[in-house]
Amino acid sequence: QSIKKFDFIVCNPPFYRQGAYKSEDQHKAISKFQEFLPLHSFLTKANSMLKPNGTLYFCYEALALDEICFILKD
């Protein structure tokens, strides 16, 4: 649990899925592929860093909208 709390967070988390071309450069792969930061982990951590009624702005692939809504309902 984070000690600092924020009014809003802006983030561009990695969202490429397995099967997409993965760079041999480990830093690039980490920055692009969700296997290094799963959606549920990202949303849980971001939520823990928000103040009550805080806002999270992030971009993610549209195909994950149902999954995002499901996770955020918890």
Image (cartoon, helix red, strand yellow):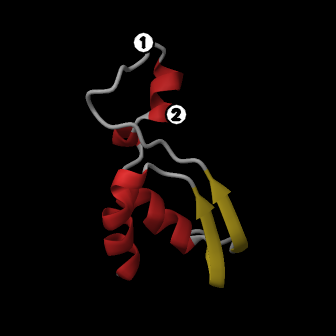
In front: 44, or 3?
Answer: 44
Query: Which quadrant is the C terminus positioned in?
Result: bottom left
Q: CA distance from mark 2 to mark 1?
A: 12 Å
Above or below: residue 11 compared with residue 50 = above
Residue plotted at (46% across, 20% down): 26
Q: Position of residue 5 (x, y in %)?
A: 68, 74
Disc 1 target residue? 24
Note whether residue 1 is visible.
Answer: no
Disc 2 target residue? 31
Note whether residue 11 is visible.
Answer: yes
The crowding category of the residue bearing disc 1, from other C-alpha atoms within 10 Å (few below 14, some 14 to 19, many at least 20), is: few
In the displayed image of the protein, which residue is found farthest to the front? Answer: 62
Element class at badge 2: helix
User: Going from the N terminus, do you reach mark 2 or mark 1 first?
Assistant: 1
Above or below: residue 35 compared with residue 2 = above
Element class at badge 1: loop
Q: Amino acid at mark 1?
A: Glu
Q: Position of residue 39 (x, y in %)?
A: 39, 55
In front: 6, or 73?
Answer: 73
**What number is the disc on residue 16?**
none
Q: Amino acid at mark 2?
A: Ser
* Residue 50 location, quadrant: bottom right
Above or below: residue 56 compared with residue 13 = below
Above or below: residue 30 compared with residue 62 = above
Q: Is residue 74 left or right of residue 7?
A: left
Q: Is residue 70 left or right of residue 44?
A: left
Residue plotted at (46% across, 57% down): 42
Residue plotted at (49% across, 64% down): 45
In the displayed image of the protein, which residue is found farthest to the right? Answer: 7
